[in-house]
Image (cartoon, rainbow, N blue to C red):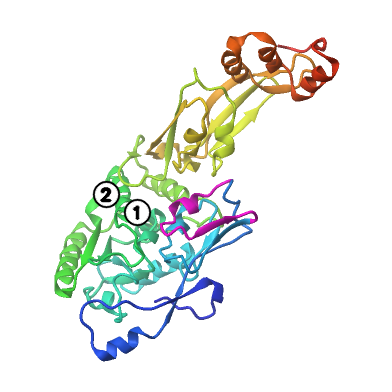
Amino acid sequence: MSDSSGIENDRLKLRFLRPKGEISRRELLKLVVPRYQVVPFVEPSLCPGAQQCGLCRDSCLPEAIKTRDDGVNIDTQMCNGCGACVGSCPYRAISYPSYSPEQLDEKIASALSGSVNGPGIITLACNNCSLSSDEDTAVQMTPAGISVVEIPCLAMVSLWLLLRAFERGARGLALIKSHDECAAGVDSGSWQENIRFVQGLLEGWGIETERIRSFTASGDTAGITWELEQFISETVALGDTPLQASALTSLPGEGLILQVLIKEMNSRLGSPPGITVTAGKVSFGRLELDGSRCSGCGLCVIECPTEALTLSSGDESSRILFRHDLCVACGRCADICPEKCLKVERVLEVDKLQNSAVVLFEGNLARCRCCGNIIGSQAMVRQLRLKLTNGEGSLASQLELCPECKVGQLILGSDIPEPVTGVKQ
């Protein structure tokens, strides 16, 4: 159980430990003593709101994240404390007391420094699943030399944390889950996918994928201890990785942190170009757009929660720009596209994590044929004209007018005002 001292009450949840197997009367008395569990909360000043983002809400299994007119909040009583929402927030607006990225980074550093002459292997264990009334279970079943870092739930083991451990010099990572059902109700497949992604990235870098593995702890601690000892022996035989950095990647104060870490690690390794990762839960997206169908309406830009899509307009043309390093593959752009011309593929293309935007769509702007103000893209006007009475009649002709001139037309009658001199069509 995490230390709840000094933490505000609205960030704590009352919890009773659940028994596992047969217990004594003395142990039963321990179980009825309430414990306080720390749960995450939303920083209103950093959260843009559910209408602009809402990715945390989509990741919350117990549906504890609620939306309000003035923002987003987490229902403490419904929250299971798994922490999955923390990694899903691109704005770092969700805080988890005692388990922020900075604090977890310190735990990893402390674990490695505490075993300087050891095997350099870290165990990540869930303190809700692997622990019952005995809070030393995870430590007891771990062989000597392995450092244990306990977290609320393995659902909180982010891609950033796994890669950061390797950057700090870990030779291997072991993730331990309980053989029982997850106390937070999280499907282990979610964080197992993170392991597969890291293995895919390690393979691209020419590093052994068996350096990171998951283990299941049963009631027989001897069995899991033997498996871990085998993992230690095999991993130590592989030696150090080339990922350890003398100067660690700086942790940004806000925004996406995984992209920065991968880009820096890849640059230091001098890896060959063309590395792509499609295995596991890939938190990066590649967009494909059918330019023959796109109207350039910009709804995809408005819907993008991370500003991976932006709109750039000049005097006569507009462009939709895309940045791979900011895309989290949420798929919202494709869902809202009225022309259904966008396709999102989950893939990491390491070479494209360079903060450079590529042109996804470019088209000429259409101007009001009366006043000359911009009314949208020519492609959008063309698409709408085809859909409205086959491009004929007064309704279609109004597409060439801005809202003000349309109102003027209604006031003046059916005659359309004469075009302003010099307005380009």
Magenta span has 177? no
Asked which secondary structure carries label 2, the reply is loop
Q: Amino acid at mark 2?
A: Ile
Q: Local crowd at mark 1 within 10 Å, few (<14), some, or many (≥20)?
A: many
Q: Which mark is residue 207?
A: 2
Residue at screen point 60% across, 20% down: 380
Residue at screen point 32% across, 80% down: 135
Quarter of the picture containing the C terminus is: top right
User: Which residue is denoted by mark 1 in the rendering?
Assistant: 243
Give yes or no for contact between labels 2 and 1 (Cβ–Cβ under 8 Å).
yes
Q: Which mark is residue 232?
A: none
Q: Amino acid at mark 1?
A: Leu
Q: Is residue 296 visible?
A: yes
Residue pushed farthest right? Answer: 412
Of pointers 2 and 1, the one earlier in the residue sequence: 2
Give the image location of residue 228, x and y in percent.
19, 67
Please state the extent of the stretch shown in magenta in the rendering. 52-70
Asked which secondary structure carries label 1, the reply is loop
Q: Is residue 248 visible?
A: no
Magenta span has 65? yes
As drawn, 242 above or below 83: above
As drawn, 152 above or below 291: below
Give the image location of residue 410, x and y in percent.
80, 19
Position of 91 compared to 133: left or right?
A: right
Q: Quadrant of residue 180?
A: bottom left
Q: CA distance from mark 2 to mark 1?
A: 9 Å
As drawn, 268 above or below 381: below
